[in-house]
Image (cartoon, helix red, strand yellow):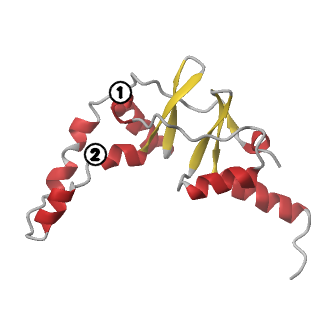
Amino acid sequence: MLVKQIMTGSPKTVTPETGLLEVVSLMCLYRFSGLPVVEGDKMVGFIAEKDVLHKLFPTLEDMVADRLGAVDFDGMMNKYRDVVNLKVRDLMTTNVISVSPDDHILKAASTMVRNRFRRIPVADAGELVGVLSLGDVHKAVFQSVVSAGMGGR
């Protein structure tokens, strides 16, 4: 079974100039863990929840200080207001790993698991054509096995 048979076509995208407030609103409202970043038809990046939240994490120096009980984690959460005023270009990943629509779904899933992704862009010659999630793969494998008859038990 190929990626193009189960991927979500025409995924929601953002541009490098999209404000992060819009992006995090989409992430929270629609439970997107990440969104492809495009300019025209070309994929130029990916913005994920971890990119946004990473800006709130304590630094190594903060963690050393935490041994003395000095890290104000609640104060760090307040930095979120500053983060959402940034643009996608400020936090997006530009070295995007993608899969091809003609890849086998298990090859795509292994790429996702190896890189700890829950979803991955599907690109053809640098052009975004869809998004694939681990849930899409799992559902397709489940349906394939069930329709062939579970057997063996």
Please give the residue where the numbered disc 1 appears in the rendered image. 19
Helix, strand or loop for disc 2: loop
Q: Quadrant of residue 4?
A: top right
| Label 2 close to label 1 by CB (< 8 Å) | no
Q: Amino acid at mark 1?
A: Gly
At 78% from the left edge and 39% from the top edge, which residue is drawn? Answer: 102
At 78% from the left edge and 49% from the top edge, which residue is drawn? Answer: 104
- Counting the numbered discs, the total is 2
Residue 127 drawn at (x, y percent):
64, 25
**Vertical arrangement, residue 72 with respect to residue 28, above or below:** below
Residue 20 drawn at (x, y percent):
35, 32
Q: Amino acid at mark 2?
A: Lys
Helix, strand or loop for disc 1: loop
Residue 117 drawn at (x, y percent):
54, 52
Q: Residues within 10 Å of mark 1 (few under 14, many from 20)?
A: some
Q: Earlier in the sequence, mark 2 or mark 1?
A: 1
Q: Residues within 10 Å of mark 2 (few under 14, many from 20)?
A: some
Q: Residue furthest top?
A: 40
